[in-house]
Image (cartoon, rainbow, N blue to C red):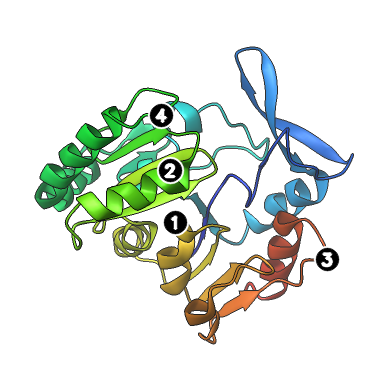
């Protein structure tokens, strides 16, 4: 079996705030509003690829946030949510996977609690601090990069990684990254070959461990792009269209 690990937001699907052209379909409704879309080309390519690959979304979204998405291509049997800490199989949480994830992050819990303490006192914070399933810490700040810099000064290096994405701030155990989750799932499913796609720094470990990886044009990840297995897209199409077209042409990788 060959597996395709893919990030979701800004990789396969796009916020209503993101321009992806007129030929698109809604894939997520939240509080009665259409909030996420995919292009029609991405939809058609996913339909075909699903016949040849096991498609596994890998996302920082929680189970509840992931379950709002409907790709319209039929059941997606597996998904790795909460940055890979939770495995969904036919929509149900795999208890053994989650318990193993908790064991993996046990040594990082003290640092995550420290991070939460500092974020609670962050004057630029604009939402509550959330401890996502005891796996990682998340909040939003007006000046997220400033909050990240302050956290990096206060926390001990080695146990956690601190990221920002727009207003979002994440403190994630180093043992709970998308690359580690993909490697675990590869063993779990007995995959022979793997492909991966993603658009953010969260995705770099996942792209690095794949046999074939697709990164967005201008990503600026020189160490990753130096690998023969990693391909930077040209940027002439919407990233989802471009990466799936590339994957379709190299599906026998």
Q: Which residue is mark 3?
A: 236
User: Label for residue 132?
Assistant: none
Residue assigned mark 4: 125
User: Which residue does the numbered mark 1 point to in the structure image?
Assistant: 202
> Mark 2 and 4 residues: CB-CB less than 8 Å, in contact?
no
Q: Secondary structure at mark 1?
A: helix
Q: Is residue 252 visible?
A: no
Relative to residue 101, is residue 31 drawn left or right? right
- Mark 4 or mark 3, earlier in chain: 4
- Count of residue discs: 4
Whether pointer 1 and pointer 2 mark residues with C-beta atoms closer than 8 Å, the reply is: yes
Q: Mark 1 or mark 2, which has the lower sequence index?
A: 2
Using the image, tell me which numbered label, if any, was put on residue 60.
2
Q: Which residue is painted at 69% across and 64% down in the image?
A: 243
Which-is-in-front pick, marks 2 and 4? 4
Is 3 or 231 nearer to us in this picture? 231
Q: Looking at the picture, how far across and down is residue 105, in whole percent?
A: 17, 49
């Amino acid at each position: 079996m060959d597996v395709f690990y893919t990030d979701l937001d800004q990789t396969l699907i796009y916020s209503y705030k993101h321009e992806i052209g007129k030929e698109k379909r809604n894939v997520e409704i939240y509080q009665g509003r259409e909030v996420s879309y995919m292009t029609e080309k991405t939809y058609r390519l996913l339909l075909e690829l699903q016949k040849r690959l096991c498609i596994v979304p890998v996302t920082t979204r929680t189970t509840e946030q992931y379950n709002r998405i409907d790709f319209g291509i039929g059941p997606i049997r597996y998904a790795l949510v909460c940055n890979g800490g939770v495995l969904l199989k036919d929509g149900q949480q795999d208890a053994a996977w989650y318990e193993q994830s908790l064991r993996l992050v046990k040594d990082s819990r003290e640092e995550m609690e420290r991070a939460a303490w500092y974020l609670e006192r962050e004057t630029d914070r604009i939402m509550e601090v959330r401890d996502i399933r005891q796996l990682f810490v998340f909040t939003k700040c007006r000046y997220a990069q400033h909050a990240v810099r302050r956290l990096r000064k206060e926390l001990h290096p080695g146990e956690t990684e601190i990221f920002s994405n727009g207003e979002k701030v994440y403190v994630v155990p180093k043992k709970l990254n998308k690359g580690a989750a993909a490697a675990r799932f590869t063993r779990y499913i007995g995959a022979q070959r793997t492909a991966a796609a993603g658009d953010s720094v969260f995705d770099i470990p996942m792209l690095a461990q794949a046999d074939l990886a697709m990164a967005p044009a201008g990503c600026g990840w020189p160490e990753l792009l130096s690998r023969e297995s990693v391909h930077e897209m040209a940027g002439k199409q919407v990233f989802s269209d471009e990466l799936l077209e590339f994957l379709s042409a190299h599906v026998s990788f």
